[in-house]
Amino acid sequence: MIQQEVPLLAVLVIFLCDFAERLCGQRTIAKIQKQQDCCTAEAARLQKQAERLSGPSTFAQSAKLGRKAVALEKEAAGLQSKKEAVLTALPVRAAKAIRTAVTLALLFWLWGKPALLVESRALWPLTRLLTTQHSAAPGGVVAMSAIATLAVTRRASSAIAAALAP
């Protein structure tokens, strides 16, 4: 038996913010990371090839390969700054801000009240950590505090979003 005080709409908003942040940010970052890895690998390959061509007769070719490697390393550094820009983009920041605002609103709304009434055996190994005894609850039912409920909700939401938008 589980009784809830936490509005499901707020939990849904938290999940949607996690999902939107993951969808907007992580997919783009994964593409950029792939390009960055290719640039870095190609630069390393060209650098090795330039080192092998260190003789006087192949100096020009070695210098040309070295310049290409440096250019690819600069491109990889540019991609790194592009990755950082994606993390601070407006949709990602908006999702984080909304999620934080909803979480804080729930915390203030639920402060001092039991956020969730759960049977103690449902939380067995962590019962004392996650709950407080609620005097009005019948035997075997414990009340989860607002902080514990929100922590579990945020973590579960993040894990589900990660599973849906890898």
Image (spheres, grey):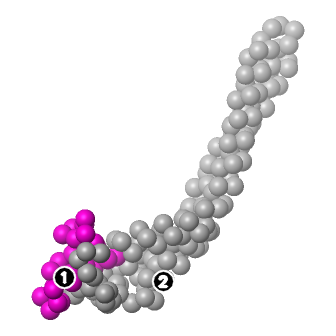
Residue 39 rendering spot, x and y as whole percentages: 72, 40
Tag 1: residue type? Gly
x, y percentage for residue 96?
A: 48, 72
* Identity of the residue drawn at 41% across and 80% down: 101
Marks counted in the figure total 2
For residue 115, say whether it is visible: no
Confirm whether the magenta stretch covers residue 141.
yes
Q: Which residue is painted at 45% across and 89% down in the image?
A: 9
Which residue is pictured at 87% across the width and 9% down the height?
57
The location of residue 40, given as percent across then percent down, is: 68, 37
- Which of the two discs, 2 and 1, sits closer to the camera? 1
State which region is magenta.
123-150
Identify the element where label 2 is drawn: helix
Q: Vertical placement of 74 versus 102: above or below?
A: above
Residue 141 placement, left or right of 155: left
Task: Identify the mark at residue 12; answer none if there is no mark.
Answer: 2
Quarter of the figure with residue 120? bottom left
Q: Residue furthest left?
A: 135
Tell me if label 2 and label 1 are in contact, CB under 8 Å: no
Say whether disc 2 or disc 1 marks the residue closer to the N-terminus.
2
State the CA–CA distance, disc 2 to disc 1.
Answer: 29 Å
- State left or right for residue 87 relative to residue 77: left
Q: Amino acid at mark 2?
A: Leu
148 drawn magenta: yes
Residue at 38% across, 79% down: 103
Local SS, label 1: loop
* Figure check: 110 above or below 93: below
Q: Quadrant of the N terminus?
A: bottom left
> Which residue is tagged 1?
140
